């Protein structure tokens, strides 16, 4: 039936199993409603997907690479904990400047810092746009302490899609 070898991660097996059940149901039942969002809900879903799946994931990968470059130049120096903030970019850049422009690792790290700056600005812009759309759809949810506009947007888009199937 399913590949249950120890090498295959359990989560992947469950996702694959769930997808096969969904596809099987779609083939057996051609009259099932089509799942789609229109209007503001669709735009919110696209923004949320682009925000998390692409931009934040790429920024996280760059941060992971960037942490090693200053360590290679100066093993005793620790990069800031919240390296995605502008103040951290300035701290890392100032530390890298101490090594001059001759070090290859220094030049690569400076490029990564510039990429992080661009990603952070774009993520902040998308977050503001998501907040606008969440305010239109459900402004009362923003008053709840601990609920970020991104999480509210993701939850709303998923709930609205499920509601249309009923």
Image: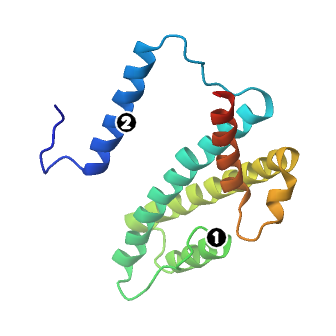
Reply above or below: 154 against 147. above
Residue projecting furthest to the bottom: 76
Residue projecting furthest to the top: 30
Looking at the rendered image, the quarter that the C terminus falls into is top right
Image color mode: rainbow
x, y percent for residue 88 = 60, 75
Label whose residue precedes the other's in the sequence (2 or 1): 2
Q: Residues within 10 Å of mark 2 (few under 14, many from 20)?
A: few
Reply above or below: 78 against 7. below
Residues 46 and 119: in front is: 46
x, y percent for residue 149 = 74, 56
Q: Residue at x 65, y 58 (%)?
A: 120
Disc number for residue 160: none
Looking at the rendered image, the quarter that the N terminus falls into is top left
Task: Judge depth for marks 2 and 1 and give the one in front.
Answer: 2
Q: Is residue 143 left or right of residue 69?
A: right
Q: Are marks 2 and 1 in contact (CB under 8 Å)?
A: no
Residue pointed to by mark 2: 18
Identify the element where label 1 is drawn.
loop
Q: Residue at x 59, y 67 (%)?
A: 84
Q: Is residue 77 left or right of residue 115?
A: left
Q: Residues within 10 Å of mark 1 (few under 14, many from 20)?
A: few
Identify the element where label 2 is drawn.
helix
Disc number for residue 85: 1
Q: Residue at x 37, y 21 (%)?
A: 24
Q: Is residue 159 left or right of residue 27?
A: right
x, y percent for residue 119 = 61, 53
């Amino acid at each position: 039936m399913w590949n249950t070898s120890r090498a295959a991660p359990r989560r992947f097996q469950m996702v694959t199993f769930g997808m096969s059940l969904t596809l099987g149901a779609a083939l057996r039942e051609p009259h099932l409603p089509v799942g789609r969002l229109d209007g503001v809900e669709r735009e919110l879903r696209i923004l949320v997907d682009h925000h998390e799946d692409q931009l934040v994931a790429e920024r996280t990968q760059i941060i992971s690479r960037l942490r090693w470059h200053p360590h290679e130049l100066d093993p005793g120096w620790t990069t800031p904990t919240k390296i995605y903030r502008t103040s951290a970019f300035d701290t890392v850049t100032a530390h890298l400047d101490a090594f001059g422009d001759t070090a290859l690792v220094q030049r690569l790290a400076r490029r990564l810092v510039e990429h992080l700056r661009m990603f952070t600005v774009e993520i902040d812009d998308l977050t503001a746009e998501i907040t606008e759309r969440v305010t239109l759809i459900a402004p009362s949810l923003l008053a709840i302490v601990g609920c970020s506009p991104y999480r509210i947007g993701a939850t709303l888009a998923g709930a609205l899609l499920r509601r249309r199937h009923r």
